[in-house]
Image (cartoon, rainbow, N blue to C red):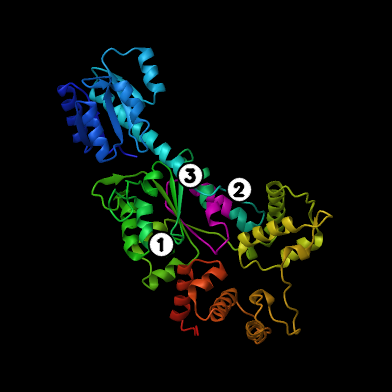
Amino acid sequence: MPVEKVIMVAQEEFLRKQVAQFLRKKRIDVAECSTIQEAHDYLGKGNFDLMLLDESLPDGSGSEFLVEVNLRPSKPMVVMMGAEGSVDTAVQCMSDGAFDYLLKPFSNEQVEIILRKTDQFAQVLNVNHFLTQQDSEDPDQEILGTSESTEQLRKLVRRVAQTDATVLIQGENGTGKELVARALYATSTRKDGPFIKLNCAALPENLVESELFGHEKGSFTGATNKREGRFELAHGGTIFLDEISEMSLPLQSKLLRVLQEREFERVGGNRTISVDVRVIAATNRKLEQSVEKNEFRQDLYFRLNVVPIHVPPLRNRENDVQLLAEAFTQRFIRSHGVPVKGLTPEALQALTSHDWPGNIRELQNVIERAVILCGEDGQIHPEQLGLTAPPQAGDGDAPTGLIEKNPDPEGSSSAVNAANQQADDLLTLAELEKRHILSTLKQHEGNRTRTAEVLDINIRTLRNKLKEYSDAGMAID
């Protein structure tokens, strides 16, 4: 994080002017103070990134003021300055919370080193703070599978990871796009830098810009402090933008500038911030179609699609189902502490026969539920998987995977009738998805918010789906 505001507390006017002039040439704001009281006044008006604090001041000891500064909820990093420094003095200041110690007189080059160390340390603190607020990540980050498509995916990831090229990952929901992004990061030259992610569909549109680029104090209601955005946190590492297709057009133009020039301004700010970041984006939509519909900028699409990676759906990776199921079983046995021996041959057959519209995420959830519900024999049987068997030809049964259990007899009856009318048709997965979405929407009398909750999808995703059906001339009533 770049140092933007410095408070210089020193009795000697020549020293203050010399350092302040050097810092201002670097476009850093400097507050000059000759006493502790003046420093108090400045700290009460705003926050600073760095304080250069003299040990000897007219109205008190700098060392004592250091302790007081470090008790503040929002505090600058403090570098002590002394004319007759000793090892003991420096050690004591560091133990009291000083970031570093400068022996007077010192050169501009020494100040430059202090700024660079402060930048690096501040980024480490901010990244750690950000990561501790995130959900714990899955410790198993390996791309599992023995199918040909999985092996080709691994080869492509290994090859692309060694470059700094921007990558666009495309695939259906639940196929493991974030896993691919993490694999790209973990085997790249940036693996020692941060990996910062943002789901563009998980936040209200008006907050995405602030999350990406940060904001200045007072830039909008609730902005009580300056905040670094995800791009700043990712400096020197990788940023992963999930569901990039959900980003609004105005924000797309700002993202395009970052990709082209690697610089931006925070919301409400005018200071240009440069970053060194690798960008990986992901989407479950075909961006080419979004470009044709003017929902996604063509120039941004070209910038993102430098290296395209397609993650195949699980139904095209039949040989991987058993391997993934067994790996998930062992994982959830460890996490839940359940004495499960494994899957029966019948359960494995049921898993390999399933179509997996929810892909790997669905398989993972199915296995976790089965581990929790496993019986006393320690074996997972088909009934514990909760999978519905596919309808037999000519039996007239509805595809139960499309029917939501509803205590309302009338609602259940209409869902069953609607499914029965198509029981003998061979439907595509997209058609099945469409019918399920529209059926759920109808059951909830057109309430999109409730429908999205029931379907466990984002409201913006639901709106996009309905718009897609409407643009294709499909009836959505």
Measure the C-alpha gap from mark 3 to mark 2.
21 Å
Callout 1–callout 2 Cβ contact below 8 Å: no
Regarding mark 2 in the picture, which secondary structure is present there?
A: loop
The label nearer to you, 3 versus 2, is: 3
Which is nearer the N-term, disc 1 or disc 2?
Answer: 2
Residue at left offset 48%, top offset 44%? 131
| Residue 177 is inside the magenta segment | yes
Locate residue 304 relative to residue 339 in the image: left or right: left
| Rendered position, 112 above or below 377 | above
The foreground one among 399 and 209 is 209
| Rendered position, 23 above or below 155 | above
Regarding mark 3 in the picture, which secondary structure is present there?
A: helix
Task: Tell me the magenta residue range.
Answer: 153-180
Locate residue 169 relative to residue 375 in the image: left or right: left
Residue on which disc 2 sits: 142
Name the quarter where the N terminus is drawn.
top left
Residue at left offset 61%, top offset 53%? 151
Identify which amino acid the numbered label 1 is placed on.
Pro
Residue on which disc 3 sits: 131
Q: Position of residue 235 (x, y in %)?
A: 38, 43
Measure the C-alpha gap from mark 1 to mark 2.
32 Å
- Corner quadrant of residue 302: bottom left
The foreground one among 151 and 218 is 218
Identify which amino acid the numbered label 3 is placed on.
Leu
Callout 3–callout 2 Cβ contact below 8 Å: no
